[in-house]
Image: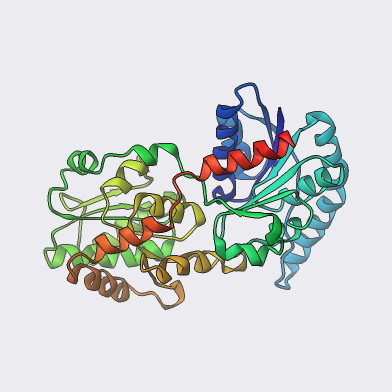
Amino acid sequence: MRVLIAAGGTAGHINPALAIAGALKAAVPDADIHFAGRREGMEYGLVTKAGYAFHHIEINGFQRKLSVQNLGRNLEALWHLALSGPRTRAILRAVKPDLVVGCGGYVSGPVVRAAAKKGIPTAIHEQNAYPGVTNKLLAKDVDVVLAASAAAVEKLGAPQKTFVVGNPVRPELLTQDRAAARARLQAGERTVILSFGGSLGARRINEVVAALCAWEQHTGQNILHLHATGSRGVQLFKDLAASEGFAPGDGLIVKEYIENMPQLLAAADLVIARSGALTLAELEVMGRASILIPSPNVAENHQYHNAMELQRAGAAVVLEEKDLTGEKLVAAVQALLAEPGRLRAMGANAKTLGDPHSLEKITQKLLELVQK
């Protein structure tokens, strides 16, 4: 079985694609799996590191805001779009796939559409509650549509061939021991708060979390707080700590990047984070309460729609960045801690939304498609 997976742009598209590739390989050990994506995108490094063959295709989105800079970007996007047809056909001739899967990002568009026109079995996976433009356009052409959320089904426009399968999460999340994870951190009876804003870091999250850390230390809260600044936030957070009068120590651990996320999620009582689809899938599977701060810099404002799914289920509190201050974050945490059992109840609500069998469902649907 030869499989071509197209995904790009963000880790939210690429990591599910890699998880699907791994599951297909586990189910069919001799499967020959290839990826298509941008060499300049983050997909190139992640895919080649995982050991899969990579086929380069350049495709960009169009900028809606009028400016001289965006005019140049749109001309470049038009050029890449004109070249995408011949390049896609060359990739399909080289790979000769039995199955083509799109996992989002602009690069999925030409690859999946060309495969569908050639009669190759095709599928897409939509990670968000509010679908991206590419997947909405592809839904009518492909054989199977896989949606992470029931909220996306009607928006994708092909309900008769859409299956709700959840978002795949890292298998190691499902085997974590909470007591052992808390013991390794020497958490004791303290409330464990985990906060992060992505690998690069989010300036606003670093700023408001700094205010929260200052409140925790100045008021002597019984909290163990673990915060990841991201690569761009290391010096900023040091400067904020100095100005706010707090410091890392027994109750505060500050790192640039979290490398042991499964263990820390297992230990956490409350998570403060963005609301990318994969982050939420992990919170749901682990059953963790959260304060979600959707990124305002994403297509279709999809992080806000993702986050509201959890808030409506009583699993999260959503704070929009445009309204966010350090005082508001502190007030939100205070309110959650003031009500005994609130965090446990929110975590239980989150768990009702998670699907630990997502990868199995996705793999089954894809294999059924090939075997037809």
Query: Is residue 76 positioned above or below 43 on the image?
Result: below
Q: Which image quarter: residue 190?
A: bottom left
Q: Position of residue 141 (x, y in %)?
A: 79, 53
In the displayed structure image, the side of residue 98 where residue 165 appears, left or right: left
Q: Tell me where residue 330 appears, x and y as whole percent.
A: 26, 71
Decide if residue 55 is in sight here. no
Residue 235 locus on image (x, y percent): 36, 54
Rendering coords of residue 233 (x, y %): 40, 55
**Colour scheme of this structure image?**
rainbow
Observer-nearest residue: 181 or 106? 181
- Relative placement, left or right, of 369 versus 261 is right
Q: Residue at x 64, y 45 (%)?
A: 41
- Please say if 106 is above or below 311: above
Q: Residue placed at 52% from the left, 50% from the top?
A: 167
- The quadrant the N terminus occupies is top right
What residue is at 52 percent from the left and 68 percent from the top? 305
In which quadrant is the C terminus drawn? Answer: top right
| Residue 166 shows in this picture | yes
- Numbered disc total: 0
